[in-house]
Image (cartoon, coloured by chain):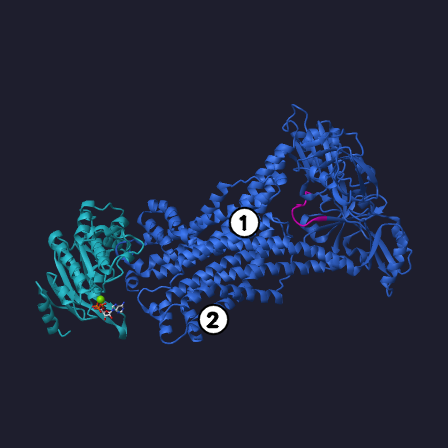
Chain colours: A blue, B cyan
Amino acid sequence: MLRLTLRNLAANKARFLMTTFAVVLGVGFVVSSFVMSDGLRSTFGALSEDITAGTDLLVRPTSEFGEPLPLPEDLVTEILAVDGVDNAEAFMESAENELQPIKADGSTITTAGPPQLTFAWNDDTEIGAFTIVEGTAPDEPREFSMDHTAAAKHGFEIGQTYDFVTPLGVEEDFTFVATTSFGADNATVGATLMHVSLAEAQRLFGDPGTVQQIAISVDPGVDAAAVANDIAAVLGTTTAEIVDQATVTAEQKAEFTEGIDIVGNVLLGFAIVSLFVSIFIIYNTFAIVLGQRVREMGLLRAIGADAAQLRRSVVAEAVIIGVIASAIGLAAGVGIAALLTAVFEAVGAELPAYPTILSARTVVLAFVLGIGVTVASSIAPARAAAGISPIEAIRDGAAVTPENGRQRLVRGAMTLLAGVAVGSFGLFGPGLGTLALVLTLGSAAVLVFLGLTLASPAVARPLTAVLGWPVAKLMGTAGGLARGNASRNPRRTATTAAALMIGLSLVTMGYVVGESVKSSLGNLIADSVSADYVIAGMDEAALPPVFADELAASGQFEAVTGMRYDEARLGADVREVTALDMGTIDVLFDIDLEAGSIPASDATDVILLHDELAADLAADVGDTVPIEFVSGHTADLTVAGIYADATIFEDPLVPDQVFDAAGAEVADEWVAAVLPDGVSTADLAPFVAELERTYPQVSIDTASEFQQSFEDTIDSMLLVVNALLALAIVIALIGIANTLALSVHERTRELGLLRAVGMTRRQTRRMVRWEAVLVALFGAVLGVAAGSLFGWGVVSALPADTFGGSLTIPIPQIVQVVVLAAIATLVAAWLPARRAGKLDVLDAIAH
Amino acid sequence: MTVLDPPITSLTNPRPANIAAGAVGVSKIYGSGDTVVRALDDVDVDFVEGHFTAIMGPSGSGKSTLMHCLAGLDTVSAGEIYIGDTDLSGLSERDLTLLRRDRIGFIFQAFNLVPTLSALENITLPMDLAGIKPDQAWLDEVISTVGLGDRTDHRPNELSGGQQQRVAVSRALASRPQIIFADEPTGNLDSTTGAEILAFMRRAVRELGQTIVMVTHDPVAASYADRVIFLADGRIVDELHGPTPESVLDRMKSLGS
Ligand SMILES: Nc1ncnc2c1ncn2[C@@H]1O[C@H](COP(=O)(O)OP(=O)(O)OP(=O)(O)O)[C@@H](O)[C@H]1O
Ligand SMILES: [Mg+2]
């Protein structure tokens, strides 16, 4: 029996090559997601160790909640005096892109990629982990250094002066004094790493007299734990803790890993979609190839092979294909990882260099998945083929009898309903954790897809007839025959189309959700924001604290306010609180006040609550709520009003004075401004342009640009999603071409007849290509329908007060995708069509 | 007439006007070296318009090969094939296809019909492929003569073997080709059904002036023809006019097959 299995594989090489290809791509994608995340994890793991290499102990501030307050600088001297301490230095690190050097050509380094970070220089290069490559340490005001890789890349030269974008505006003439190396190899993973003196760091992104952390090295041979105890005593009442190097490294690693895991899991998710899609293709290939071998099977049964033997022989074929495909997929995975890395780089999200790691886990998983998927998809066809009676098979024209169509339809409908039920539970049921939600919705999608595939043969005939009508009209007889061919074997059409259906349904869902959110947000923003300008830091860069004041002072605006966020304990829980100029709320926003009134700008110790929060706190207008800040500052705030609109604010709103008194966050997250009546944004364009020159890190959007930037964000997310779904769609198209090639082979005689009675090669090719397009369109129609359903579910499940919950079906985009898929199908069908056109008429008739 | 102009007309070698198709010194050699097979060996034959010719001969004598060469489905190793006065040897693949579509009809032993098309669609297929509107009166006449009646909307798998062959015959007739080639058209049918088909083919020749060339093993089938040509080892070895089953059988016996 094994010999027969091997012979079969050898005889159907071309047919199985296509099958293998589908598995290879699926497995390859899975492998690539592991190769990338393993590689990145190793790179960042090494980085975590580099960062803390010379530090034995670290003192850092703590707080019960929120962002802790910095440490007093004097603490450094006190720690230095502790026995066993070799050295202690301040550690200061800017926020990402908080400081941006301006290159000689006047441009800044892009903030879209790896971050730009600035540190306070440590003279102790053990502690600092940085060494000078060339030049002298930046210890004077307006001096800076940069890691030598970034300096070379961006053209910074020692001795020259450069301007800097700082939170205080653009500052001129910083002298570039040194190039540095991070660790031995300057493994910056693409970031731009700069240093200034401690005093400059305090001035530019800290506070005078304070430091963020204190890094400590102990004397050789001294027990670090004992020294830590002594230092803890020195800390006294300061809210701070002391941790050792291992802890810091582990935390750092965990933080990096979290980010890498997210990327890795997203990739893995898409890889699983691809693998799922390839199941349908493998299944189809097996079903068709076995259908063609039905006579041979019958003969084997007649001469004494039992059904189990036949089944085993087919499954053995599947195992062999699975093994080969997994092995190739493993290699392909490394290639796909490189490709994805290049794609990331092309879209501006450059990944750091990482080693290629094929862990045992990856290898095992590749084989388990590859073989598992192949064998699983061969089981049903194997059973059907082995189940035929010998006499049935030997009788002329016998085919594997398909199971009862009605039964199939019922099973499909039930599976579909089960999927919808599970999906509804996931979307509308009790709040599930992320993983549980993903698993619930994932299995709902799988059930829906299986249900549709089972049930869709019932509609394959009428639907392809309708879809084929224009084709038959426009393409003449070849079109008519294509239409007939597309509907002649509904099950085959349905399974072939299923792969494309899955890919396109996910694309459609993305579009529906994206467009719905866009239009809902658009409406909400139009309703609730009357500000003319919305201003925020570019790419998450911090907004200079002086910015809002400068705008207000400019006299160009009727009202300006900055929005500051910080955490505070309100009632029993810690929540995010927003501080702003209360008096401007009425002019800038429509927060839909339900009760009370909006206080004036000079009101202190008041608070506005969103109605849900008010209900939570059981607070009404006129009640007082206690608030406690990170600094320990407390106040009793009187509820001035309760609002309902959650588009912009959901936080409790307090006057700026409350934050100022509490020493809470000083930097604005964003700023809103409105022009006086009669002044248009066009009138203000020169002023805005000037501001943008002074603060290049700030993006000043008009209300419509603000809305546009939301839309752009959603669009670019959709782009990434669609790019990742592209592989699944490519697999689906290969599947269509594959099925078609098998069908052409199966219909050789018929093609010969057509050619004999006068069908030209071109007509033959056209017939095959349009059959492919019809199958693709069938899948597309189902996919768009299913995707719209998914999209509707997701949109309905989104909170109505933030995303609006109104459904938009972006027909132009969907049509565009469907047309693209149809064109791609024409291309994919080129080979089988060519083969059909090239058939030798006599051979074909004699087939 | 809906027959298109011949794609290429031979001027140098004018053919007699009433010859629908013919072979001049045709040889067909398969393989090379030791395995060479001379399937046709210097065959000269003409098929007169409005005649029904049967080709007979033992298995492997070259009947199908001759028919395939005549129909432009296969190329000859030597000699010339004419359809009307068109010399096929100069034609491209595409011209041959168009010639088959417009001027030749086919009836095979089995698998004559496209399963996805209805009987009527199968009948009009060559004309549909050419983008020509069939002559409705003629079509009705053909269909009623063949006796398909109301079954023209059925798919081939809903028709009996005999009905399928009737459809195939109708298709061959519908576009009024210059010549129809039939390779054992009744080989798969029982004798009664076969007789009906053959009678119908003869009527098409007598009443409609159609030219038909048919390959057969069956002396009874051959007796429906006006003339029988006997092949052996790729050569025409005998010929019989006005055959009866008995005379055909006699001749076959004398040829030792
Ligand atoms: N493609 C081919 N390659 C090699 N030899 C061939 C090929 N086709 C036919 N032959 C040979 O040519 C000869 C004539 O074959 P042909 O099919 O014309 O016979 P036939 O008279 O139609 O026989 P039958 O009555 O069995 O159909 C045979 O010897 C056959 O083996
Ligand atoms: Mg023959």
In the displayed structure, A589 sits above or below B93; it is above
Provide the secondary structure element on which disc 2 rests: helix
Q: What is the crowding at mark 2: few (fewer than 14 residues within 10 Å), some, or many (at least 20)? A: some
* Residue type of the residue flagged with mark 2: Ala
Query: Which residue position holds label 1?
Result: A722
Q: Please check the rendered image and state whether residue A111 is part of the magenta-colored stretch, yes or no.
A: yes
- Residue at the spot 54% in from the left edge and 51% down from the top edge: A421
Residue A427: horizontal and vertical position, in percent?
59, 48
* Residue A53 seen from this side: no
In the rendered view of the protein, which quadrant contains the C terminus of chain A? bottom left
Q: Nearer the viewer, residue A90 or A401?
A: A401
Residue A291 at x, y percent in the picture: 38, 64
A263 lies left or right of A481: right
Q: Is residue A288 visible in the rendered structure shown here?
A: yes
Q: Nearer the viewer, residue A196 or A364?
A: A364
Question: Ligand 2 shows up in which quadrant of the image?
Answer: bottom left
- Measured in 3D between alpha carbons, the distance from the residue under mark 1 to the one under mark 2, in whole angstroms, is 36 Å
Subunit of mark 2? A
